[in-house]
Amino acid sequence: MAPDGRALVKLYGGWIKRTALLVRARMPWAELDELLQWGAVGMLEAMQRYDRAHGVDFAAFAARRIRGAMIDGLRRDGALRRGESVMDAEAVDSAAFQGGTSPADPLSLLLRADTRHLLIEALSKLPPVEYRVLALHFYDEMNNREIAAILDLSEGYASRIRKRALLSLSLALAAAHKGETVP
């Protein structure tokens, strides 16, 4: 179970503000007050959704949810300002699954709990540099420039490695879903 609300504010209040400032540095049009509000909502969602049984530390879980809430808020806000309709991804996924028209792409396969082990197996077969690039990109949320600096590569090469790794994962997951094996 997650810590209580007051303890979280004390522990993570400054962290939420730092995250908001980092997001704003990358997206200068973002309003700091809105980012802080979305970050607080992300913290509340993290408190509600956290499950220790998944083996993830609460701080890591909350960090991703807070940053994700800020980015989701920016997406919704930007779409509304441009007069676009905001698409509810969960409603689309649910309609696709119910109608039997769900695309058989790797992302839709990963959304199913029974295929997580396939992803873990596919990740374990990646070459170390491809695995490291994906970990830095998706877990540490780094861009190609940051990854290139850490691994002492060119930015373009880091991008190609990431694309190659994602293609390998896609092929492995699609093959596993069909019952085939990929070397």
Image: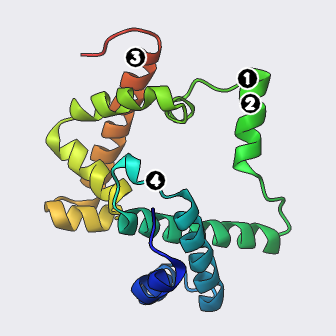
Q: Which residue is mark 2?
A: 96
Compared to residue 152, the image places residue 92 above or below, namely above
Q: What is the three-letter code of the residue carrying label 2?
A: Ala
Q: Nearer the viewer, residue 129 or 101?
A: 101
Q: How is the image coloured?
A: rainbow
Residue 153 visible to the viewer: yes
**Disc 2 crowd, CA 10 A, few/some/many (<14, 14-19, 20+):** few
Q: Which residue is mark 3?
A: 176
**Residue at (28, 35) in percent of width and height:** 123
Residue 29 visible to the viewer: no
For the residues labelled 3 and 2, the Cα–Cα distance comes to 22 Å
Mark whose residue sits in front, 4 or 3:
4
Q: Nearer the viewer, residue 157 or 178?
A: 178
Q: Is residue 41 left or right of residue 52?
A: right
**Disc 3 crowd, CA 10 A, few/some/many (<14, 14-19, 20+):** some
Disc number at residue 101? 1
Mark with earlier residue (3, 1): 1
For the residues labelled 1 and 4, the Cα–Cα distance comes to 31 Å
Mark whose residue sits in front, 1 or 4:
4
Residue 147 lies, in percent from the top left, at: 26, 62
**Disc 4 crowd, CA 10 A, few/some/many (<14, 14-19, 20+):** some
Q: Which residue is mark 4?
A: 51
